[in-house]
Amino acid sequence: MRSAPFTIVISGKRYECRVAGDTESEAADTAERILHQLRRDDRVWPAQVNIDCADFEAGKRLAAYFAAITVEPDLD
């Protein structure tokens, strides 16, 4: 089984969710949907979002994107 070029790991105190995608936008869109769901419950709001990809520039874009959406007052 080959690994996806983009992997995003969303983790909190009692959970870990791995999102894999063949493209930057596919992984980001899926991870954002999960973050929207998690945001609804303060008890499970993620402590970390880790990005794993070989493309350094894409990783920087994803990091900036998730930094911006995790500090928004309302993701809904």
Image (tube, helix red, strand yellow):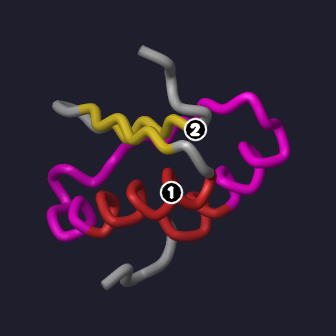
- Which of the image's four quarters has the N terminus? top left
- Is 26 rendered above or below residue 37? above
Q: In this view, does 44 lie to the left or right of 33?
A: left
Q: Residue at x 76, y 48 (%)?
A: 58
Q: In this view, does 33 lie above or below 10?
A: below
* SS type, badge 2: strand
Asked if disc 2 and disc 1 are in contact, CB closer than 8 Å, the reply is yes
Number of marks in the image? 2
Residue 70's disc number: none
Type of residue at label 1?
Glu
Q: Tell me where residue 18 appears, x and y as whole percent.
A: 35, 35
Q: In this view, does 48 lie to the left or right of 17?
A: right
Q: Is residue 40 within the magenta segment?
A: yes
Where is residue 47? Give x, y as percent.
38, 42
Residue at 27% across / 66% down in the picture?
A: 39
Q: Residue furthest right?
A: 57
**Badge 2 or badge 1: first in the primary sequence:** 2
Q: What stretch is highlighted in magenta?
A: 37-64
Q: Distance between the residues labelled 2 and 1?
A: 9 Å
| x 61%, y 33%: residue | 5
**Residue 76 point in image, percent of width and height:** 31, 85
Residue indicated by mark 2: 6
Crowd rating for badge 1 (residues with CA inside 10 Å; few <14, some 14–19, many 20+): some
- The residue under the point 82% across, 37% down is 56
Residue indicated by mark 1: 26
The amino acid sitting under disc 2 is Phe
Q: Is residue 1 above or below residue 14?
A: above
Please identify the quarter of the rendering in which residue 16 is found. top left
**Closer to the camera, 72 or 22?**
22
Front in this rendered view, residue 11 or 26: 26
* Circle 1 SS class: helix
- Locate residue 30 relative to residue 3 in the image: left or right: left
